[in-house]
Image: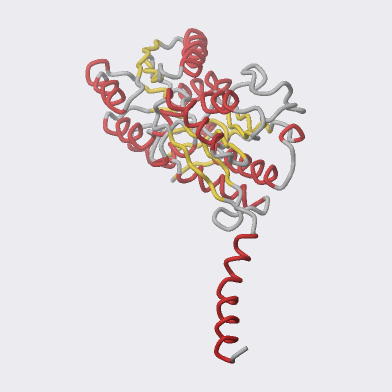
């Protein structure tokens, strides 16, 4: 063989070796993240999910890819989005925004592992047979929300004792959350002598319309119901409550961090981190049936003292004493 031919042969083989090696490497596993909202106001939650993945040794872009499916608060799109993830044969589905995505994922597959985040009882919802032994392809995180409605209204009344009329904002498109909120608020309101006005909003424009009634109705306080859509609109809600100088209570700390008066509820970012950790463990071979449903018991009362001062409110010492954080 001539020297020139030998060099050409060796050079050509060397050029093809990296391609051959890459072809032999296994494809990066994919997590399908299914959420009924849009990612605009979920930065902290997504950061928590990715941190949970890292806790289990999985890093987005390094050894796992995440395929995001956002419904943009169009609930009827969730079944098709879930089916699309199944067609793509993702390794795990993370249903991160409550009941509807979790049920859509459950209906779409009986084989692909699903990690859910819900605020209601997952056994009652039919997601799992048992909290300790899920016994299927679903497991996840159960944080308390609806069960805390009564306590949250009591705390709002304690912070605004002069209030007699409270507006309650709910999303009728999410019937389960809305019905629970109305029922629980009604019981407490009757017990402590509050008048309740129910306002409904399932779109951005309907939120604006609901607050427009404040000029006429002049409620003493606002109670924002537990709902993924309302949570995704926290910047808008806090801005409108500030504009109308209405003391308001919310379910998650990021409302108070954004300028809302007070929040009381589970640490939602922590729940997303737990879900990320579960998704990572499943990628490493753990079966969903062997991962018990985590029930988040960490509850946080956060009070924004700057907002209280702006509203002319004095935070009672007893609330300051039990608050997990007071934002100065």
Q: In the depicted view, which residue is nearer to us: 20 or 147?
A: 20
Q: How many numbered markers are drawn?
A: 0
Q: Residue at x 54, y 56 (%)?
A: 61
Q: In the depicted view, which residue is nearer to us: 91 or 5?
A: 5
Residue 232 makes an appearance in the image: yes
In the image, taking residue 197 as reference, residue 136 lies left or right, namely right
Residue 85 image point, x, y percent: 53, 36
Q: In the depicted view, which residue is nearer to us: 34 or 225?
A: 34
User: Would you place residue 200 above or below residue 320 in this image?
Assistant: above
Residue closest to the far front: 1
Q: In the depicted view, which residue is nearer to us: 43 or 84?
A: 84
Residue 266 image point, x, y percent: 57, 33
Residue 71 image point, x, y percent: 42, 32
Q: Residue at x 53, y 18 (%)?
A: 150
Q: Splitting the image into 4 quarters, where does residue 161 fall?
A: top left
Residue 297 makes an appearance in the image: no
Residue 189 image point, x, y percent: 47, 11
Q: Residue at x 49, y 19 (%)?
A: 177
The colour scheme of the drawn protein is secondary structure
Q: In which quadrant will I find the N terminus?
A: bottom right
Residue closest to the far top: 190
Q: Residue at x 33, y 27 (%)?
A: 246
In the image, taking residue 153 as reference, residue 246 lies left or right, namely left
Q: Splitting the image into 4 quarters, where does residue 104 fall?
A: top right
């Amino acid at each position: 063989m001539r020297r020139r031919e030998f060099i050409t042969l060796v050079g050509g083989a060397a050029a093809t070796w990296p391609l051959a090696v890459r072809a032999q490497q296994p494809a990066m596993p994919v997590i399908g993240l299914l959420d009924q909202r849009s990612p605009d106001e979920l930065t902290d939650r997504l950061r928590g999910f990715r941190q949970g993945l890292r806790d289990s040794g999985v890093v987005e872009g390094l050894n796992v890819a995440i395929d995001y499916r956002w419904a943009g608060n169009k609930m009827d799109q969730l079944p098709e989005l879930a089916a699309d993830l199944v067609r793509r044969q993702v390794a795990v589905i993370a249903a991160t925004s409550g009941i509807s995505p979790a049920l859509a994922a459950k209906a779409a597959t009986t084989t692909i592992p699903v990690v859910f985040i819900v605020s209601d009882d997952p056994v009652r919802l039919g997601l799992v047979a048992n909290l300790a032994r899920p016994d299927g392809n679903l497991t996840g995180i159960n944080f308390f929300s609806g069960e805390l409605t009564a306590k949250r209204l009591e705390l709002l009344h304690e912070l605004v004792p002069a209030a007699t009329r409270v507006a309650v904002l709910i999303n009728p498109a999410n019937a389960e959350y809305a019905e629970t909120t109305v029922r629980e608020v009604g019981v407490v309101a009757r017990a402590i002598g509050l008048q309740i006005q129910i306002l409904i909003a399932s779109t951005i424009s309907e939120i604006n319309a609901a607050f427009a009634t404040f000029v006429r109705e002049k409620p003493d306080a606002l109670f924002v119901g537990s709902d993924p859509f309302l949570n995704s609109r926290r910047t808008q809600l806090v801005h409108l409550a500030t504009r109308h100088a209405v003391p308001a209570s919310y379910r998650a700390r990021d409302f108070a961090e954004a300028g809302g008066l007070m929040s009381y509820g589970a640490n939602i970012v922590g729940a997303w981190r737990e879900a990320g950790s579960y998704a990572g463990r499943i990628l490493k071979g753990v079966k969903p049936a062997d991962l018990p449903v985590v029930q988040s018991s960490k509850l946080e009362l956060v009070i924004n003292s700057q907002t209280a001062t702006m509203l002319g409110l004095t935070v009672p010492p007893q609330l300051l004493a039990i608050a997990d954080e007071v934002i100065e």
